Amino acid sequence: MDKARVAVIGSGPGGLFAADELSRANTVSIEVDLLDRLPTPYGLVRYGVAPDHPRIKSVIRGFESVLENPAVRFLGHVEYGSDIDLDWLRRHYDAVVFATGAANARKMDISGEELDGSIAATQLVAWYSGHPDNSFEPRLSGSAVAVIGAGNVALDVTRILTKSVDELVTTDMPDEVLALLRGSNVRQVHIVCRRGPVHTRFTTKELRELRDLVEVDVVIDPADLDRVDETDLPRAAVANLKVFREMADAEHRAGRKKVHLHFWHKPVAISGETHVTGLHIERTAVDADGAVVGTGEREHLPLQLVIRSVGYRSDPLPELPFEPRRGVVPNRDGRVLSDDGEVLPFIYVAGWLKRGPSGVIGTNRMCSEQTVEQILDDLAAAESRTSADSAAVDQSLRERAVHVIDYEGWQRIDATEIERGSQSGRDRVKITDWPSLRATGLGVSP
Ligand code: NAP
């Protein structure tokens, strides 16, 4: 039978791992078009992984070889829902994989969340990562900040806000971001964790990084550590506990910034009239059913910025079913299910849109492999191929006035950013605005 043609929507880790698996399949011969609304590939690896984590970002080298595979085409600057729809995808491809991730932030649903100065970690991340959609700039004139949540994103934003700017100048952070951080008055960060030290979702490596920040003391109430029952703790929790103890035992010096880890506290309300002036937190405990409940013991932290880092959230995609409670597209091992639980033929999901926003980058490989197994089974069982060839796809996009930025276009952006970086001794300085990204990608003057 002819080659099958598969569209993968989203070129972050979920989409790239899927494209890689599909292009290497030996039971069915497959060509992949990897579409993204951005002119740049790599999703949250480019726009989510902290700029001071170059080792994590180096996964891009493996992704480059996926994009260089002749069986994979990158079609950037093509948006599902506006440039193309499900019918168009069905007409042009034998199968479609949605891997658009979870770019939005969950809410806490507490009063004051709408105040000026109450923001989502995703806004801060988009700002310091130079995302072209970002128009937000945090106000860092106040001395105290709260970060709500005990996950790695909370650690990322805490580190970026407290680390010496001299250690950040070699990263790919935009110059305006570095300038604002240099003028920052932030001296205190309160991380609010609604459960205890052994229940956090911090990974030990990232915790050690916080422990080792040169200008920062981490403040922990030793009583929270003394209360821990250490029997049958998972290995990761034991390792984290050791780091918390080292933090609690470390000598504190006047003049250093302070990161306060408030275990067993939940946010109850943000105070302020128009701007944030503080955060009310309440001591928590676990009830007989294992639920986290407030104990009534409250405290008010005066501060000027509240950053909620309580997890990402996927938005529903046009024409696809959505499970609002879990924030995922309903699926069985990657095969998308209708609201009635029926398989939607040849429509699949991978990555955070499939399983929710958890796990590290590598977790997406297994997730995408599982989806690709279903695709290969379905394509092998199909009686015929219905896809159009790549020239017909290109022609149709041209007719729709879609200005595709392909791999060559991305390479132009990449080379320009690397060149800009070399002028200031950095690996890269990102292009952060849409007109320049478009012009560079399309090879035209802005
Ligand atoms: P996360 O790991 O799911 O952590 C979310 C945190 O928010 C949890 O501590 C959760 O507490 C808390 N939370 C949720 N709702 C809350 C509420 N209403 N009030 C107070 N606290 C609340 O999410 P994330 O930090 O956004 O990270 C997403 C994924 O990316 C994770 O898998 C993470 O490991 C990964 N990541 C990895 C790295 C890295 O490897 N360096 C960096 C960044 C992100 P409960 O546990 O009690 O629900």
Image: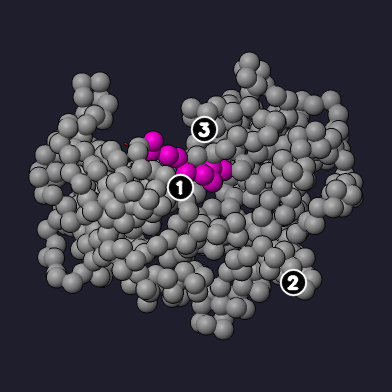
Q: Amino acid at mark 2?
A: Pro
Q: Which residues are magenta?
A: 101-109
The foreground one among 119 and 114 is: 114
Mark 2, mark 3: which one is toward the viewer? 2
Disc 2: which residue:
446
Residue 297 vertical position relative to residue 259 in the rendered view, above or below? above
At which x and y percent is residue 40?
A: 65, 59
- Residue type, numbered disc 3: Gly
Q: What amino acid does circle 1 point to?
A: Val
Residue at figure coordinates x 74%, y 68% from the top left: 439
Residue behind mark 1: 360
- Dot 1: what SS? loop
Mark 3 = which residue? 327
Q: Residue furthest front?
A: 273
Q: Quick one: label 3, few (<14), some, or many (20+) residues within 10 Å?
A: many
Quarter of the figure with residue 47: bottom right
Mark 1 CB in 8 Å range of ligand 1? yes
Q: CA distance from mark 1 to mark 2?
A: 37 Å
* Residue 278 highlighted magenta (yes or no): no
Is the residue at mark 2 in contact range of ligand 1, meaning its CB lies under 8 Å from it?
A: no
Residue 296, picture quadrant:
top left
For marks 1 and 3, the one nearer the N-term is 3
The residue lying toward the viewer, choosing from 389 and 402, is 402
Q: CA distance from mark 2 to mark 3?
A: 38 Å
**Mark 1 vs 3: CB contact within 8 A:** no
Q: Secondary structure at mark 2?
A: loop
Which tag is nearer the camera, tag 1 or tag 3?
A: 3
